[in-house]
């Protein structure tokens, strides 16, 4: 072989390899900076695995029988993966944390607008404030807010009226219908036992174990659940997809009148003295201060300091140093 041709051929091969490697580094650097989206193939086995696990979880826990989600693509969104799925003719996005622990049905932009600052909150005052928290029982952020709500309820339950109400549609499958009905009835039977049950459920998610720790009459509870289900046509509307909100979300009409009155959009929604309020920091102490602002004459209990820790979203007793925002809503 001609020596000159041999050398030239080697130089060409090396040059091509350098371009391929450099191009690969550039693509992944761009993805890391969030400037481009990588398909599952390029993101690699981790994203592929999380995408498959998310689809499996959604099909087993969030969709009604006969409805199936399929994976469209996975893209890198910095600290989470955005997963586009296909359900029927819809292609909604869900989000999975990169450690694979959390699935989010919605994401919220936390960057504050420089041109549209949040309005200051001027709460209506009352001798005995009325505090309503609207949730979906399996919404991670609703659970987070319930863990904030409970210590304030225990502190001020004799000074203010507290109530857990339910958003008028569900996003987390049949288990959410069952749990919403159960909690609705327990609260109606005994608010103190409800607080005990809810504290246990929000931290462990163990329904049977949490019920056993209360003095709730199980027979009366079952009768109430069946009666409420029949009265508000909960299961019948779940079985009839033509009634679903936007064709995707089964209705849960137990507190429909309150949802309409306060224009409730998602979980959690806080209403104090008939006004929706924003809970910027989700800690018991911050929420206590908010409720105490709604008194004409704040009681002595308002001088007590509660925890400033922010509970983690979802079921569990952990706290977080991250965002205290977020919600579930269409």
Image (cartoon, rainbow, N blue to C red):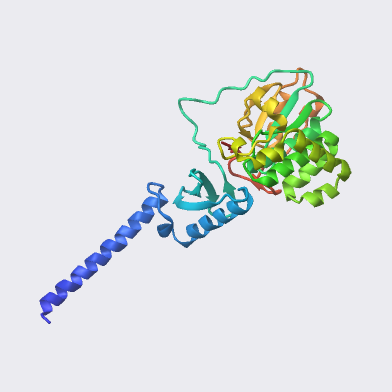
Q: Is residue 65 visible?
A: yes
Q: As rendered, which of 55 and 27 lies closer to the eye? A: 55
Quadrant where the image shows the C terminus: top right
| 115 vs 315: above or below | above
Name the residue rendered at 67%, 38% in the picture.
237
Q: Is residue 93 left or right of residue 160?
A: left
Name the residue rendered at 73%, 33% in the picture.
232
Name the residue rendered at 84%, 28% in the picture.
158
Q: Position of residue 272 (x, y in %)?
A: 70, 24
Q: Position of residue 317 (x, y in %)?
A: 71, 48
**Residue furthest to the bottom:** 1
Quadrant where the image shows the N terminus: bottom left
Q: Position of residue 176 (x, y in %)?
A: 69, 43
Place residue 225 in its image quadrant: top right
Q: Is residue 267 left or right of residue 200?
A: left
Q: Is residue 309 visible?
A: no
- Total labels: the figure holds 0
Name the residue rendered at 84%, 40% in the picture.
223
Q: Position of residue 125 (x, y in %)?
A: 72, 18
Place residue 129 in its image quadrant: top right
Q: Is residue 37 left or right of residue 152?
A: left
Q: As rendered, which of 232 and 113 lies closer to the eye? A: 232
């Amino acid at each position: 072989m001609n020596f000159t041709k041999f050398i030239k051929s080697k130089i060409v091969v090396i040059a091509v390899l350098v371009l391929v490697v450099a191009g690969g580094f550039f693509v992944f650097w761009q993805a890391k900076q969030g400037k481009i989206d990588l398909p599952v193939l390029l993101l690699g086995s981790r994203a592929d695995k999380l995408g498959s696990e998310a689809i499996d979880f959604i099909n087993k826990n969030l969709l009604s029988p006969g409805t199936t989600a399929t994976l469209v693509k996975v893209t890198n969104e910095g600290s989470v993966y955005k997963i586009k799925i296909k359900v029927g003719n819809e292609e909604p996005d869900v989000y999975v944390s990169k450690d694979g622990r959390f699935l989010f049905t919605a994401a919220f932009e936390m960057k504050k607008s420089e041109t549209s600052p949040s309005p200051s909150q001027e709460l209506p005052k009352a001798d005995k404030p009325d505090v309503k928290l609207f949730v979906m029982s399996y919404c991670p952020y609703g659970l987070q807010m319930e863990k904030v709500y409970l210590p304030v309820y225990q502190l001020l339950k004799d000074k203010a009226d507290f109530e857990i109400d339910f958003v008028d549609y569900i996003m987390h499958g049949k288990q959410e219908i069952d749990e919403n009905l159960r909690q609705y009835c327990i609260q109606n039977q005994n608010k103190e036992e409800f607080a005990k049950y809810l504290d246990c459920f929000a931290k462990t998610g163990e329904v049977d174990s949490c019920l056993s720790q209360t003095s709730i009459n199980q027979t009366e509870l079952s009768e109430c659940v069946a009666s409420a289900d029949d009265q508000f046509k909960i299961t019948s509307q779940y079985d009839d997809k033509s009634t679903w909100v936007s064709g995707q979300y089964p209705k849960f009409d137990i507190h429909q009148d309150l949802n309409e009155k306060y224009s409730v959009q998602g979980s959690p929604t806080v209403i104090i003295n008939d006004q929706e309020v924003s809970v910027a920091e989700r800690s018991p102490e911050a929420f206590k201060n908010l409720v105490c602002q709604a008194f004409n004459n704040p009681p002595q209990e308002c001088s007590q300091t509660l925890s400033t820790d922010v509970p983690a979203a979802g079921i569990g007793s952990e706290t977080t140093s991250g965002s205290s925002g977020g919600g579930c809503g269409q």
